[in-house]
Image (cartoon, rainbow, N blue to C red):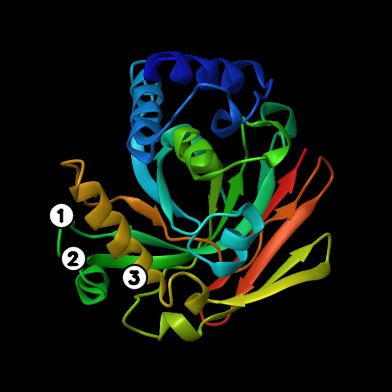
Amino acid sequence: MTVQAVADLLYDAHATRRPIDPLSKTPGLELSVADAYQVQLINVERRLKTGRRIVGCKVGLTSVAMQRMLGVDQPDFGHILDDMVLHNGGRCATNDLIAPRVEPEIAFVLARALNGPGVTRADVLAATEYVTPALEIIDTRIKDWKIALVDTIADNASSARIVLGDQKTSPRDCDLRLVGMILEKNGQLTETGAGAAALGHPAEAVAWLVNKLGEFGQQVAAGSIVMPGALCRAIEVAAGDSVTATYDRLGSVQVSFV
């Protein structure tokens, strides 16, 4: 099976909301990490041709909890398109998704572009306009979340939607490693976490992204939203659920599922 054929399978699964068998378990298909990123980019380009815009990037699998949850040992990245962004307090239609889960993050918005290689945490902090509380709604086009690293990479890092908070804070005003977070579902505490869960510091995850994109000749543009990874495990959601993440010093963010 060609890279294009794999991209076609995933694109159709996204359009029809009918999940496919794991690519990593398909007999005769030897999909490398490089192949998986090629699949991702093919489908991102397809969506750009329909009028969508790239507004940022996401880093996935930066926490030990998420790596253990999905059985992988390294981060990955995906692209955020304009139709994936929801406003704080907004609603997410579950019938547009397959098996949604939610994870809390600290989103970065860049004041200037960053180019790898060699970008450091300090470079990221200097280039960031503000950080804001965020939720990422992840989803998979692979049956039952039975994913290996190449599955999630090819599937745009299992991305679906993001929700950004209203409060904007300079990352130089606090130590993001120490920012605590509580995650509530339907008013009940479900998870806790802190900024250090994302590669030790959320800005480290952003630096990883910039340097990884540099390998592909890409940069992270000024104004980009960057989601640097989860602060705890992802929780399952369904229609009727409401999820709120509250962060020390950064404010809160909420989304309802319909």
Between discs 1 and 3, the one toward the N terminus: 1
Q: CA distance from mark 2 to mark 1?
A: 7 Å
> How far, Cα to Cα, is label 1 from label 3?
14 Å
Q: Position of residue 117 (x, y in %)?
A: 15, 58
Q: Does 188 sit left or right of 22 as displayed?
A: right
Residue indicated by mark 1: 115
The residue indicated by pointer 2 is 119
Does 23 appear above or below 159? above
Mark 2 in CB contact with mark 1 (< 8 angstroms): yes
Identify residue type, mark 1. Answer: Asn
Q: Amino acid at mark 3?
A: Glu
Quarter of the image where the N terminus is located:
top left
Crowding around mark 3 (Cα neighbors within 10 Å: few <14, some 14 to 19, many 20+) is: many
| Label 3 to label 2: alpha-carbon separation | 9 Å
Dividing the picture into quadrants, the one containing residue 94 is top right
Residue 161: % across, % down: 56, 42
- Give coordinates of residue 249: x percent, y percent: 52, 82
- Disc 1 crowd rating (10 Å Cα; few below 14, some 14-19, many 20+) is some
